Image (cartoon, rainbow, N blue to C red):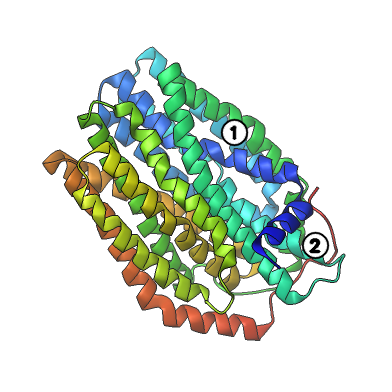
Amino acid sequence: MSPLKSYRHLLDLAGSAYVVVAFLGRLPLAMSQLGTLLLVAGSTGSYGAGGVSAGALAVTNALGAPVFGALADRVGQRVVVLVQSLLGAAGLTAVVALASTGADWRWQATVAAVAGLAIPQVGPLARVRWRPIVHGGAQGGSSSAGEHRRLVDAAFSYEGSADEASFVLGPALVGVATAVFAPSAALILAAALLAVFGSWFAVHPSADLARRTRQAAAVVSGALLTATLVVLSGAQFAVGMIFGSAQAATSVLATAAGEPGLTGLLHAVLGVGSVIAGLAVAVLPETVGYETRLRIFATCLLVLATPLMLVDSLGSLAGVLLVLGFAVAPYMISVFSLAERLTPPHRTGAAMTVLAGATGLGYAAGSSLAGRFADWGGHTPAFAVTVLAGGLATLLAWAAAPRLRAEQHAAAGSGVAPRPPEPARAR
């Protein structure tokens, strides 16, 4: 089955409404960090206060993600994501309200942290739903087991591209809203999207499919936080550092060039190539294992990030970020696909959100470290953090490849992965 046919088949199984809702539901998280940074920095006159507030939101979201993911595995995504969406929307609105009163930045940072804790990780939870969607639809047809596997892999390729597209559109929306109206408008828009589409994602029928899969798999035992998941979390921490440090260094260079408003748009360039490459991953032959792909794309991250040390203008920065993006989504798709293959189905939600949380922690660490380096020597030392993160990703990928390969073979030979008990469609 060609990649185009695979994507069409997935759309038929899930329904176009689900794909649209799941994409729009993840935009608020992509908007919230940059939106908070610009809002708090504008209301206090301090980029430091804005950075701390955005970092607090990112850290609490990262720490809360595995907790809510495990809770969703236990009681179902519907109630967990619905409550998170409504509370997250209220939290973002509260940040705007505090900023408008000129409250002390510490209060703004505290409320931003609470908002971050509540915002759901729609992207990772959407990944959890694809396996029951594919298997439920396939049980009504004559597809082979190999085709089922290819459809799930294609779904993860799509999700990687969708995440990257959200981090293209999210910062771009923040930039446009800030330029046309004010930073507060960006967070109000994020809150509205979360209240509407986050809630819609929560109540979509596909949430019931995921819960039935969890119930059917409840007999499977085994620890969640395995050595393999720790390694994969480290891989996501590294790519999070790339995101955070690149955004911070880009902000420094754009501000020095007198165009601070371009920060969001420039960072969005990183996702353009990533979206294209992510969709193209489905073309790769099955003979290229995911542990091999991880090594290849981690090395590409290091090689393609290195030219950031030489950029001295916004034009050259845009070119390097565009090319670097071609390695990002394929790298992340490899990580999440490995986690999906090596995690018991009833714990997939927790595993996906652990990886998302690791990404958020990496973002916070990369942004903070790059900010300190920028204070010392400008954008070039800040971009050195991006290169360092690429090196960390490469080291982890090459060191862990034998273990990842062995565990995939063991999982394939065990045959313990359960299947949903009844055919169903997500519509």
Residue at image coords 33%, 19%? 43
Left or right side of 50 for 284: right
Within 10 Å of disc 2 (Cα), the crowding (few <14, some 14-19, many 20+) is many
Q: Is residue 120 at all visible to an observer of this figure?
A: yes
**Residue 16, quarter of the rendered image:** top right
Residue 136: image tag: 2
Q: Amino acid at mark 1?
A: Leu
Q: Amino acid at mark 2?
A: Gly
Mark pair 1, 2: CA separation: 28 Å
In this rendering, is residue 384 above or below 266?
below
Quadrant in the picture for the N terminus: bottom right
Residue 38 percent coordinates (x, y): 36, 27
Residue at image coords 56%, 66%? 337
Residue 180 percent coordinates (x, y): 44, 17
Within 10 Å of disc 1 (Cα), the crowding (few <14, some 14-19, many 20+) is many
Toward the viewer: 92 or 37? Answer: 37
Residue at image coords 81%, 47%? 427
Q: Which residue is mark 1?
A: 194
